[in-house]
Image (spheres, rainbow, N blue to C red):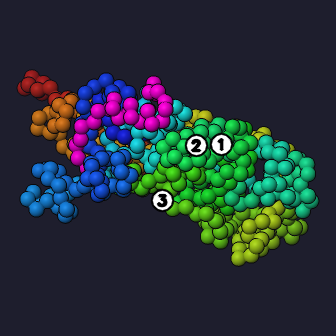
């Protein structure tokens, strides 16, 4: 999450600009909106799922948002409004943190970043102990309670033990007893076929997972009173452990296993595994997580209640990848070891690709058989999978304009590419839509409080925030509308695109000018017409 968050716990404005719970300890009672739960046994109230006194599972208390009375039904009979499952409650953050740190036998962290307010339906927070431990391990939490590492996808079907930094003996324990030719695995330079749910992660990810594993072990021991699980001291100890891969805008994670490491900033995995995440290996970036972190710390209760809140969250897990069930693009992967003479002869005739697909060994030809999982081949060997670019060019360039210019520059060098069509597609599908959308958003925008970050659909009559009295600001600015205007005009001029698009940009410029540069015209006199 940006900015970094250690714990999903509300601190309101008491935490300052960094939402720091340590800063909130220096103040008196702090009021925050948080879940109100009741223990059915000892009748104590708390925000925790389990009662601190007797260990019973607590029950959410409903209340009226207007009169505040406790409710059993879903609406208030007096106020005629829907019940809520949280209340505005006073917290002594010094007491809260002292109790948490005492139970963990650690001192206060230098900084402990929470959130200004919770956005889930019941305003359910994490326990503060998780945040203290994450702060000690310098880890950031996502909106669903998990810790993630993002990496660019890269397809891989074969590897050498020496390339992934794992010994032959260790790979033997993971089921790699023979190389791709069926010869017993004894040399680190032999080529092995990658199993479809094995993953080679970046060393940067491995370093991060060492911290995550330490956090989980300490959480198990000190909070849940269970034995530690990972006990990891080096990269080698990570090999064989399970991870989960998750693509943005999806809610199903795919189980994988760490089988090695790469110096490149990419996540090497079988194209079938990437495809199971609904990816086609074109340079997209996905998240990987330690499996136990997901099972232990994920909760649907943390997810935002607004539209799209469940996206990017592992609501479901696919433990076994079935080649037949992944995207059809993966079924077109070529797994042939060599092309026949007939294939090359057909290429000279320039016939359609689908007419010669039967001459090549594709994954689609193997569906429904054991061969859909293994026995893949390749036509072009490489000296070392780590000798490629260490970082995707897409990540090296900071601005979208830089990325576009490099895309067009590459297109100009490739004879098979009509760079004018590329420019036209960028203009019509990205720039014009973005500019028009932002222009529409400006005219329908709300307002935001600079202090408490509350948002308003319309400007309050007071002219300031109704909750904290802070000053209000816009949520959409002129700069956001015009950011691609110059680039769009540049594309039109550079590639001599049709006048229609030049006229559309001119109309948009005129609309922006009339909206912002609305200076009153000078009063004319009769002498001006003489």
Q: Pointer 3: what residue?
A: 315
Give yes or no for contact between labels 1 and 2 (Cβ–Cβ under 8 Å).
yes
436 or 265: nearer the viewer: 265
Q: Pointer 1: what residue?
A: 231
Answer few, some or many: residues within 10 Å of disc 2's Cα (few below 14, many 20 plus, some between 14 and 19): some
- How far across and down, in percent of the image, does residue 527 sit? 9, 23
Reading the chain from its start, which is encountered first: label 1 or label 2?
2
Reading the chain from its start, which is encountered first: label 3 or label 1?
1
Span shown in magenta:
86-110
- How far across and down, in percent of the image, does residue 169 sit? 84, 50
Residue at 18% x, 43% y: name it. 458
Reading the chain from its start, which is encountered first: label 3 or label 2?
2
- Compute the Cα span from label 1 to label 2: 7 Å
182 or 457: nearer the viewer: 182
Classify 255 as above or below 164: below
Q: Is residue 108 magenta?
A: yes
């Amino acid at each position: 999450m940006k900015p970094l968050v250690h714990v999903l716990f509300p601190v309101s404005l008491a935490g300052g600009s960094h939402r720091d719970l340590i800063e909130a300890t220096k103040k008196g009672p702090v009021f925050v909106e948080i879940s109100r739960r009741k223990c059915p046994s000892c009748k104590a109230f708390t925000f925790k799922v389990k009662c601190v006194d007797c260990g019973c599972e607590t029950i959410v208390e409903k209340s009226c948002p207007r009169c505040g009375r406790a409710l059993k039904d879903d609406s208030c009979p007096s106020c005629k409004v829907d019940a809520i499952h949280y209340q505005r409650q006073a917290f002594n953050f010094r007491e809260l943190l002292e109790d948490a740190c005492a139970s963990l036998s650690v001192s206060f962290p230098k900084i402990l970043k929470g959130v200004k307010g919770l956005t889930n339906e019941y305003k359910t927070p994490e326990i503060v102990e998780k945040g203290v431990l994450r702060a000690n391990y310098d880890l950031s939490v996502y909106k669903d309670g998990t810790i993630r590492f993002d990496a660019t996808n890269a397809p891989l079907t074969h590897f050498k033990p020496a390339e992934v930094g794992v010994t032959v003996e260790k790979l033997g324990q993971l089921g790699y007893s023979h190389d791709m030719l069926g010869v017993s695995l004894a040399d680190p330079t032999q080529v092995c076929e990658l199993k479809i749910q094995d993953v080679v992660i970046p060393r940067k990810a491995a370093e991060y997972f060492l911290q995550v594993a330490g956090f989980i072990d300490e959480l198990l021991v000190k909070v849940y009173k269970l034995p530690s699980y990972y006990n990891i001291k080096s990269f080698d100890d990570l090999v064989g452990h399970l991870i989960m891969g998750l693509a943005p805008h999806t809610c199903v994670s795919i189980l994988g296993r760490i089988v090695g490491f790469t110096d490149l900033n990419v996540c090497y995995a079988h194209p079938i595994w990437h495809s199971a995440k609904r990816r086609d290996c074109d340079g997209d970036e996905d998240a990987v997580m330690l499996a136990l972190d997901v099972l232990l710390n994920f909760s649907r209760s943390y997810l935002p209640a607004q539209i799209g809140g469940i996206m990017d969250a592992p609501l479901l897990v696919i433990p076994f990848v079935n080649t037949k069930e992944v995207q059809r693009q993966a079924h077109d992967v070529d797994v042939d070891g060599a092309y026949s003479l007939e294939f090359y002869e057909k290429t000279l005739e320039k016939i359609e690709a689908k007419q010669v697909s039967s001459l090549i060994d594709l994954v689609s030809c193997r569906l429904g058989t054991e061969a859909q999982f293994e026995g893949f081949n390749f036509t072009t060997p490489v000296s070392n999978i780590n000798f490629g670019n260490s970082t995707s060019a897409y990540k090296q360039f900071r601005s979208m304009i830089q990325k576009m210019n490099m895309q067009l520059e590459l297109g100009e060098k490739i004879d098979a590419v009509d760079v004018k069509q590329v420019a036209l597609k960028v203009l019509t599908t990205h720039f014009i839509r973005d500019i028009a959308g932002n222009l529409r958003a400006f005219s329908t925008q709300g307002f935001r409080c600079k202090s408490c970050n509350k948002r308003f659909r319309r400007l309050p009559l007071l002219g300031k925030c109704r909750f904290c009295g802070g000053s209000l600001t816009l949520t959409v600015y002129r700069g956001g509308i015009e950011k691609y205007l110059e680039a769009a005009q540049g594309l039109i001029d550079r590639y001599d695109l049709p006048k229609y698009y030049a006229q559309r940009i001119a109309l948009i410029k005129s609309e922006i000018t009339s909206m912002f540069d609305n200076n009153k015209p000078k009063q004319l006199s009769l002498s001006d017409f003489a």
